[in-house]
Amino acid sequence: MSRRTAPDRSIALILVGTVLLLPPLATIFLIDGKLAGVPITFLYILVVWGLLIIGGAILARPLRENDTLTATTTESEGPEVPRTDG
Amino acid sequence: MLSVNLILAVCIGYVALLFAVAFIVDRQTRRRRIAWLQSPIIYTLSISVYCTAWTFYGAVGSAARNGLEFVTIYLGPTLVFVGWWFLLRKLVRIGRNNRITSIADLISSRYGKSPSLAVLVTTIAVIATTPYIALQLQGVTSTFQVIAGGGDAVTTAFWVAAGMALFTILFGTRNLDANERHHGVVAAIALEAVVKLIALIAVGAFVTYSVADGFRDVFQDVSPEAIRGAGDIFGPRWVVLTFLSATAVICLPRQFQVTVVENIDERHLAMASWLFPLYLFGMVLFIMPIAFVGLRMMPEGANPDLFVLTIPLAEERYELAMLAFLGGFSSATSMVIVAAIAVSTMVSNHVIMPVALRVLAARHAVSGDVRKLLLASRRISIGIILGLGFLYFWISGGSDALAAIGLIAFVGVAQFLPSLLGGLFWQGATRAGALSGLIVGFLLWAYTLFLPSFDGDFILSASVLANGPWGIEVLRPQAMLGLSGMDPLVHAVVWSVGANALIFLVVSTLTEPSALERLQGSLFVNVYRAADGGVSHNAIGSADTEDLFVLAQRILGNEPARALFDEMARDQGRAGALPYATDAVIARLERELAGSIGAASAHAMVTRITGQENVGMTELIDIADEAQQLIETSRELSEKSAALEQAAAQLRAANERLRALDAQKDDFLNQVSHELRTPMTSVRSMSEILKEETDISDEERARFVSIIHNESVRLTRLLDELLDINRLEAGTLNLNVEPIEANASIASALDAVSGLTRNAGVAVTFEPLPQAVYVSANPDRLRQVLINTLSNAVKYNPSETPEIRVRAHRNGDDVLIDVIDNGGGVSRKDANMVFEKFARGSRSDRNQGAGLGLAISRAIMRKMNGDLTIEFVSDSISYFRLSLKESVDETAAFQPAAAK
């Protein structure tokens, strides 16, 4: 995946996630049925949630590397060593 | 049944474990063996301090009562973390660059390091956090009572609070970390996060697969209404709760602490972005099964909030119940610890320290005092926060009012959101906007949600809740301005957050940010652009490095201050000496100090020592203004110099003209003296002859006298003419212009020269105007001009049979009188010259007149709005033309009519 497109995809992911999890779209899945014994509405929320997590996990690396491209300063410092008193 | 002693032993053992973990980690970080601690997993686990006892126990209760609604509390954070790239990354970057110690510090820093904003945010945080801490105490005590089968709630709560205070003071204020990071605490929190997740999943799995027979069985008898809750599940409340939880995961002081302040590497966010939602997913997975199985198997009236604990107890799975209790205990304690650290930092940095420092500055305390004071202030603050929490729990008596406090606190901290987001993404946001928005939001939150939550027991009475204050219905706290029929929470969010955001926006647009606000605003909004987040301080005046060093010693401690200054001196190539107080040094020091005492205080202290305010935007603007004025002035100058050049050119021209005139005057004088000299010579020589020669005949004598007379007359005429021309040229001659009849004037002039023409034998013809025309002229002067022109025509006519033709005619408004002689007139070559003074045409001979006549005539004609010109028939043949304006005088217009 291109590092450059990662932020755009991230926006798309959140927007899609937000739209799917909020009314009015969510009300489509307000169905009184069950799938594999689990109420469909509950299942729907879990599935969208799970997809958001997977999407976030896929995008995490390209986003992080994109950041090292755009901002090398904080990265080059390396992890900060805390100050000790004494 | 579990024995109280066993439970206590397990609890104490668990707490001892936490202490040990924190202690070991703290020691390891001192020895810098902290690689494993820098794992993003630890960071993610510490963020799960979001899940408190309220979510650990309360989620099940919520699911039992309202169905799916509880999920929203986890969906908001999920969205925020998945979208870490846009908000959290910026927050963390800003936090690191500016050594931000708390959300109050961040907001205050952003808006010009404003102490008043810091105090306001701190106040709101304390008010929102105190009941939340009380809720955690209640969670621990009520579950303790359930599992131990009794016990005094207040005593339990007290010991829990005291234990947490001890832990927090021990590990939260061990040192004054430059970045306000607490590795030991974070490690302990991470451990607790693992315990609560395992506990909840263990109980969930047990309930689902042991008590019930899998998910299918769990949901078998569940009605759709149970999933949907009381009302329309995907309604306004769903949206508002999602918004609130998303807000809370940013704005809650403890979340800000773990996410932003304790962050050691920005890249950890990338992993937390999906791992934290996954953690929440794990926490949620078994909530519904526990709730529904509990509702099915537990007796009527059992508190669903305690199902996590009561189901294992009912199934006599005590070890599981113990684990569940520890999970709840972990949730509660981790929240209390982090909240206490976060809020006490705020209280200490923004309330206690500024006051203490002012007192101390007056007393000139020795180095090291501030450091001790700072630690003491932190510890006291922690004690105050936990004391308040305990007090709140004690006074409210563990009432049901506490149960709702989780969401109420969410709405309370949501008031930070407009100022926070506005400050991060909008440079136009101002301190006044943030202050007014926060105050209004906070007051509306208190009025519409917080105070009504006491059900009329605190400040707002039951009647006020029902009928509004003083019976004013439109001010009813839960139906402001008649906005009724809404869920109270939705109502409160709409009013408080809505008004907050609007006022923030409006006031920000109406006010001007101060210099520091502008600077901080651009640093925050453009944080990715600033290479090192370095503040472009331009300290003016000379800061005394020694004073700065003393200040650093007081706050950072001896060694760290020495190390810092040595490093800065080395950077300047002055190893072993104190560094110069350059802008970079001051900015660096201010940042380092901000890590301990907050940006506002650090800025105030450094500024006091450097003696002068940093060159702020106002100064820069002033400088810019001055530059602008300079540009303006120089433009004016160049305009003026252009005008001057023009004037100089005019002067030069005038000077040249003056010189020319001077030369003319000399010429004129030459001419005049010459002209005077000729007759004077005649007069003198004649009179000398008359005086000296005795033997002259009477005839000759008479001739000489006659010559003397003639020459005198000529002299007089010359002088008259000179006077005339002088007055005409100077403009002092006033000519009374009146309407006169043109033909008559010409005829009269012809009469006057008739003697002359007759003597010279000149034939004169006159072609008058066909009818009488009145011209505006001075009759005497016109006559003078005519006579002069006519006599010229007679005198300078070389023809054998001289003739003069006078022709009058009209050309529009002009009346033209042409004097034409057959002598050829003035040649084109001489045309310009003849009007000069003392000039005579080349065709004239030397002895006739002084040559002033034409010059005078033309001056007179021009004075009468007319002119005297030479008209050419060919190059060598010309004639004179007098032009006059027809009179437009009313009397003149009348007279010709009368003449007819």
Image (tube, coloured by chain):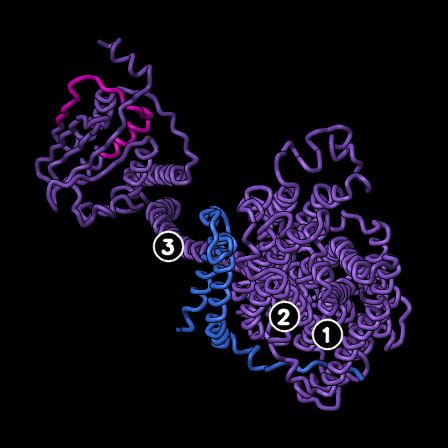
Chain colours: A blue, B purple
- How crowded pointer 3 is (Cα within 10 Å; few <14, some 14-19, many 20+) is rated as few
Q: In the image, is residue B386 above or below residue B410?
A: below
Asked whether the residues under marks 3 and 2 belong to the same chain, the reply is: yes
Quarter of the view holding residue B213: bottom right
Residue at point 29%, 39% (across, down):
B853
- Between residue B37 and residue B840, name the one nearer to us: B37
Quarter of the view holding residue B118: bottom right
Specify the farthest residue to the bottom.
B576
Residue B590 visible? The answer is no
Cα distance between the residues tagged 3 and 2: 71 Å
Residue B751 visible? The answer is yes
Q: Which residue is mark 3?
A: B660
User: Quadrant location of the C terminus of chain A?
Assistant: bottom right
Cα distance between the residues tagged 2 and 1: 35 Å
- Between residue B484 and residue B307, name the one nearer to us: B307
Task: Provide residue B136's location: percent of width, then percent of height.
Answer: 76, 59
- Earlier sequence position, callout 3 versus callout 2: 2
Disc 1 element: helix
User: Quadrant location of the N terminus of chain A?
Assistant: bottom left
Question: Which mark is in front, 2 or 1?
Answer: 1
Q: Marks 1 and 2: in contact by CB < 8 Å?
A: no
Q: Which residue is mark 1?
A: B188
* Chain letter belonging to callout 1: B
* Chain letter belonging to callout 3: B
The segment highlighted magenta reads B765-789
Q: Which residue is mark 2?
A: B535
